[in-house]
Amino acid sequence: MKLLLMQIRDLPSVREEEYQSFLSYCGLAPRELDILNVFDTPRFGPEVLKGYDALLVGGASEASVLEPETYTAVPYCIDLLRHTLDVELPVFASCFGFQLAVLALGGSIIRDDKDFEMGSIPISLRPAAADDLLMNDTPDGFHAIAVHRERSVHCPPGATELAFTDNCSHAFKVDGVPFWAFQFHPEVDRAVLVSRLTTYKAAYTDGDDHLQKVLDSAVETPESNALMGKFVDRVLR
């Protein structure tokens, strides 16, 4: 089995941290997971998927789907996701990957300058989750890590919403193909949240007191973290 992680990370330490998180929660060996980092390779086509059994898409703290003129890889990322739909390649997309998927399906993304979701938050399930291959045994109200200034209020066309909060859509599956997207971070646990927010505190918090308040309220997120292993076991194996 061979998977490709499309990574949208610039800092070397965060690149490695994210890669290790995907390896761990997917239950993969390093030889089973390659990286396409779009900061290094901003232009690419569907040929990058040759030989892979699935595509994983990570988060981003240094890019925006709403600024393709600055982050020139964004249109290529969207085109690649559309290609996976055409060829029915399994996809598991997290956070920034969720937002790319929304745009690929014709949905819309908005930006919050304040009062955005950050930390470990409770996620509510839609009735459709009970029949979903990945989420049918996930409890309603499970906690997940979310840190995002951009969001989709509605599930995009051609997909079935699986999970949500009052602020936004949080999970969907594209109808008829093995493509799942999550606004929260299934690959991030409490320890990684602490590290990640400490690294990017200037971008997401109002200072040390705000950061500490978020971290003090954070809880472990085992149900969220289990989703990646379910994707590998139930879809790919």
Image (cartoon, grey):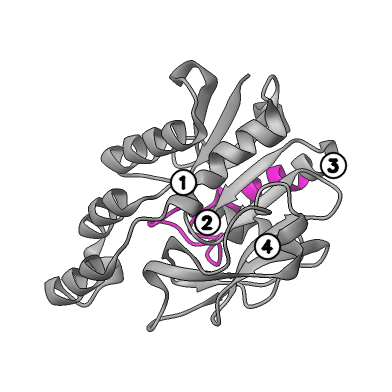
- Residue occupied by mark 3: 86
Label 3, label 2: how far apart the Cα atoms are = 21 Å
User: Residue 148: x percent and y percent?
Assistant: 44, 67
- Camera-side residue of 154 and 78: 154
- Residue occupied by mark 1: 8
- Residue 211 seen in this snapshot: yes
- Say above or below: 186 vs 28: below
- Residue 57 seen in this snapshot: no
User: Which element is circle 1 on?
Assistant: loop
- In terms of sequence position, does the residue under pointer 2 or pointer 4 come before the other? 2
Q: Are marks 1 and 4 in contact (CB under 8 Å)?
A: no
User: Residue 156: x percent and y percent?
Assistant: 74, 67
- Residue occupied by mark 4: 102
What is the span of residues highlighted in magenta in the rendered image? 58-82
Tag 3: amino acid: Asp
User: Which element is circle 2 on?
Assistant: helix
Number of other residues with Cα within 10 Å of mark 1, as a class: few under 14, some 14 to 19, many 20 or more: many
Q: Are marks 1 and 2 in contact (CB under 8 Å)?
A: yes
